[in-house]
Amino acid sequence: MRRKSNRIALLAMVVFMVVAPALHAQKRPFIGYVYPAGGQQGTTFQVRLGGQDLDSVDTVLVTGPGVTARVVDYYRRMNNQEVQLLNEQLEALKKKPSSADPTMAPAMAPAMAAENPAMMSEMSAVKSPETDKQGVAKSLAAEIEQRTREAVQTPACASIASIVLVEVTLAADAPPGRRELRLATPRGVSNPLSFMVGQVPESSRKPMISATLQVLGKEASALRKRPPEEAERSITLPCTVNGQVASGEVNRYRFQAKKGQRLVISTLARQLIPYVADAVPGWFQPVLALYDANGKEQAYVDDYQFKPDPVILFEVPRDGEYVCAIRDAIYRGREDFVYRITIGEMPFITGIFPLGGPVGAARLSKIPGWGLSGAKLDMPPANAGPGVVEISANKTGLVSNRVPFELDTLSEALEKEPNNKTADAQQVTLPVIINGRIEKPDDWDVFCFTGKANDPVVIEVRARRLDSPLDSVIKLTDATGKVIAFNDDCEDLTAGTNTHHADSYLMTQLPADGTYFVHIGDTARHSGEEYSYRLRISAPRPDFELRVVPSSASFAIKTGATVSVYAVRKDGFTGPIKLTLKNPPPEFTAGPVTIPENQPLAKFYFKGSATPTTTPVELSIVGSAMLGTQETTRDAVPAEDRMQAFLWRHLVPANDLKVLVYDSKIQPQPKHPLPFNAPPFVGPPAPGTKPPIRPADVAAPANGTPAVPKPKFTAQQIFGRLKQLKILYEDGLLTDSFYEQKVTECETDL
Amino acid sequence: MRRTLHHLCLIGVFVSLFNGLQGAEKSRISPYEVDDFAVASGKIDDLVFGSLRKAGLTPARPCSDEVFVRRVFLDVLGMLPEAGEARAFLQDKRSDKRMVLIDSLLARDEYVDYWSMKWCDLLRVKSEFPINLWPNAVQAYERWIRDALGSNMPYDRMARELLTSSGSNFRVPQVNFFRAVQGRGPQPVSDAVALTFMGSRIEKWPEDRRRGIESLFSRLKYKPTAEWKEEVVCLDPAPTGPLETILPDGRKVKVSPGDDPRVAFANWLMEPGNRWFSRAAVNRTWAWVFGRGIVHEADDIRVDNPPCVAGLLEYLEKEFVENGYDQKKLLRLILSSRVYQLSPVPSCDDPRAEAMFASYPVRRLEAEVLQDALCQLTGTVEGYDSPIPEPFTRIPASARSVNLADASITSSFLEMFGRSQRDSGMLMERNNRVSSAQRLYLLNSSQIQSKIERSWRLKTLVRDHRGGVADLVSAIWMEVLSRSPLPEELRAVVAEGIPSKSGNKEMIDDLVWALINSKEFLYRH
């Protein structure tokens, strides 16, 4: 056993780096895409997620009822040496088909039995039938082949190169719509991704292997050579198709349609992943084309109004086959260019008016759209508080797209034409929210009110943030026509996925008593039925909104975590905001933190319990401040800080803030632990550590005899190799004999 | 070695034949000319032949069907006719077959592809420096141009949309007209406006007219958004006073506050009787067909640069305007004239004759057209990539080179053959002159060699024409040159021993390679 003792000696030589788990920077798990990004109610299917820092992933969290999911497999991203080792293992497996492969040296059995009785009994069970061993070898070979197939030498995007396979089950009555899906490892909770629950049958293409990095000058070599027959798929309507677009590819879907059908072909791409990692333009921007059976183009849509996800509204002119094609607008592609297209006679709301209403009395008469005759609108309940809710139309069970609807507490008015000039201005009394539309070309809506000198007044437009295509521009003039204030675009940091801050806003003081006119129009002079707005003219309503970044945190027991809380102050609110936890789970505490006066940010530290959480818990942070004379509390909305196109940053809201508390002493158990008595693997050797010199290597006398042979590899390299072997073994990808053999090789290289 | 010699001999044979054919004056040369015109005489012919008569010059003879079929395919679609299409046309006995062919070609999708390419050259559709449209805007802009040509949008409506649209550069692609210029501000914009819609070089204008047009384009706002490279182009909504300035013809104009001065300019430009607009359009279309405008350069219309044929511009403008600025109708009018259907062989040596359209101007094919012709002949494809966006753009191989929307996406072949850089929008930016690098490439390059050797079309051709030497050689001639070989050409080929008894494909490859190097292939004639 000289070999074994040497090995122990070798490992013991390694500097034992004691690291306090709490200080060890745990990298937060990241998931970049999920494919397919949804499924039909009442089905069970497998999805793939791509991300990084997902070691030992074990839990899937999905918001909303009716969805359960579990982790099936995890393909960690592997480097070239690991892939090479696996290939060697595969060859070794294939070389010995039927010979009895003593996976354990018999002499080691007693030592093993002491350490690992479970393993021992397994061993004895395996030892007897040779076919069992063959079966094990075959399944291991299959698994290795799967892993090497998935392994990409240089992935185009390293942050989505580790793959997790998850099985999702949707209940038949799971409410349709958008959910958020997260992965959790024993050490952290990932960011959320959109996951859709659909209502019509689905068709998904085979998932893409991670794309290879494209190298300048050798772009063609990074293309996946998809067989041409896979470009087109046949489907029957209604259907939701899922796919990923690879570089330079066009995906086609062929279906039968009847004359007179009013088809809605709507795409979700940016709505699934608003900001894609390492991409310029910053998201997958599809274009949709529709062809008839002869290949003649019937419709082509790049963007739907101002939104990058195309929607085709098509009345079928004659019976026959039609082909729908999707690609990136500039022929890019990668595995996180995920889309969902729903094709069928679906209910679809094109734009509502008004865009909101007063709390408790909001009303919508008619909603323009396709397939909505006889549909029922699900309006917010009468006791719903102020804010933005999402409403949809329900036609015989099919739920339409969701559109925003705003509830507010001020009195409201409807715009009355003609009001294009100051002479025809519509009289209003403050405070008021006016619901209007820029319907005709060069339409300007003018409203007038009386005010007193030094009255502060706020004029705010809410249109683009409520999905209206209007690009508003407002100005405030006095009775002589002099312009007192003017605004075109005003940035709103709370609108995370909105990239054109088209809604205007101005806050000013009236110079004198008298009549004032508010003019609103479209900057680009566009107009139409959908160009609706909500125009608030009132005294300032100081208020604030809070965003918590990131939307998940994890820490060891008896320690805590810090999140950033951003305050977006509105209408000139400058006061301090006190942050606390709202109804925290037992043992979670946080000292009240205050965002100081006029500051936009504070770090919020909270502590957890002495016991680890069994499953990540939800935390709510609230902020309270004195708004005028009243203390008001606002919930902080969790958000993710996302980068667009390597430059801009956006706070994308998430559903909840998830927190995980773990015991750092409990290490996650590997799938297939090392059986023999090896000291725990710790950090790399301290720099300067030399590998042990065996007596044989001691320098010979310097008279003609050969000099000391330099060790072939440095300690660092050998350590790295041993670590790779250990990890691969623990993943269950190496046989014991192969592992032994490789470790021995390492030793002899010293 | 033997192969190269073979190759060179063949090229020598065909070069001399074609040159010889060009030089012969009095005798009738059958493959290129016929005795009578196949179309009726029109006003264009009266004007052009009249001016030639006045100058004492003789026009060339009418062109043969072989010349016509290849010429009209290249001029309308930017592609060679398939052998079957050419043969069908040549064997057609109808008297109006040329008009039928013109009409059928104008209805094809490839017309939209090729003429979009010309418009993209004019409108500087390029994503990188110095135009900086950016890839997403380029694809939206090119798509709009294609849609406009595909739906045969009247030219005045196209111009009005380009001049007066507002909105996001990605969602309202027409506004890219104001972004596809070098730099920002009224100066480069008015430069572009004058070049595109008035066919005029603004640097030659008097100072006051220049300042006048610049002030009409001085109220543009370029508003960026938080989407990468998105810009909203619109009339600056900030309150402002009235604008008093002069139009390019010297008339005063006053624009009220809140009104768009671009609309005032567009209204002046498209006023009935404003010759600037229609003249530039008509002259440019003529230049796109013939390679030189009635006023040459076609984008340099000035008082001291008179048209070379009197009255022709006025006639064409009248027709154009009366037909509602229909671009296809104008094109059809030009293509159906006898002047268009003249032979490429000049009948007189006078240097003025070429400028007065006494014969069809022989010009080298454009880079994209040549690339597509080579790919079409050999049944191969070319792929294009662009590293500008991330992940990289990969244009599917099925797309033709004329469909390349972006001037920043290019290849060494296209650059060598003078593809337009689209930096200025001038017609001369496309360089169709022959250089020695091009000659060497066509003669020597391994890409061309491998294209021909791997070509499944040639292999099919050889397989389908085992009936004899004449049969195979005719098929090759029809494929490459869209005509039948002359008896002396056939004799020359047989004398070289092609094809040998064993049906040696290498010799067929050499023959095709030699033909590709001939002027008759490389030039539109």
Image: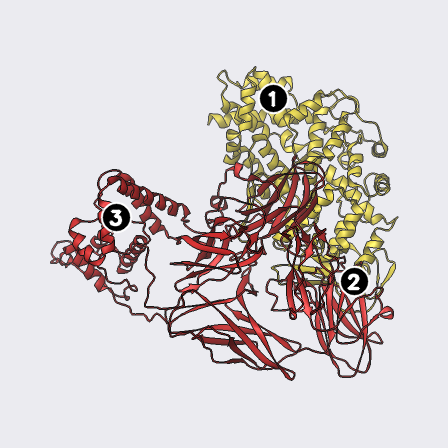
Q: Secondary structure at mark 2?
A: helix
> Who's the residue at 85% across and 31% down the image?
B42
Query: Callout 3: 10 Å neighbours few (<14), some, many (20+)?
Result: some
Q: In which quadrant of the rendered view does residue B440 lie?
A: top right
Q: Kindly indicate whether the residue at mark 3 contacts the one at mark 2 (C-beta within 8 angstroms).
A: no
The answer to whether residue A454 is seen in the rendering is yes
Q: Is residue A136 above or below residue A688?
A: above
Q: In which quadrant of the rendered view does residue A248 lie?
A: top right
Q: Colour of chain B?
A: yellow
Q: Is residue B463 left or right of residue B256?
A: left
Do circles 2 and 3 both sit on a common chain? no
Residue at which label 3 appears: A738
Q: Is residue B103 above or below residue A197?
A: above
Q: Label 1 is found on which chain of the structure?
A: B
Position of the C terminus of chain B by quadrant = top right
> Who's the residue at 20% across and 53% down the image?
A748
Q: Label 2 is found on which chain of the structure?
A: B
Which disc is residue B475 wearing?
1
Q: Spatial distance from mark 2 to mark 3, Cα to Cα?
A: 80 Å
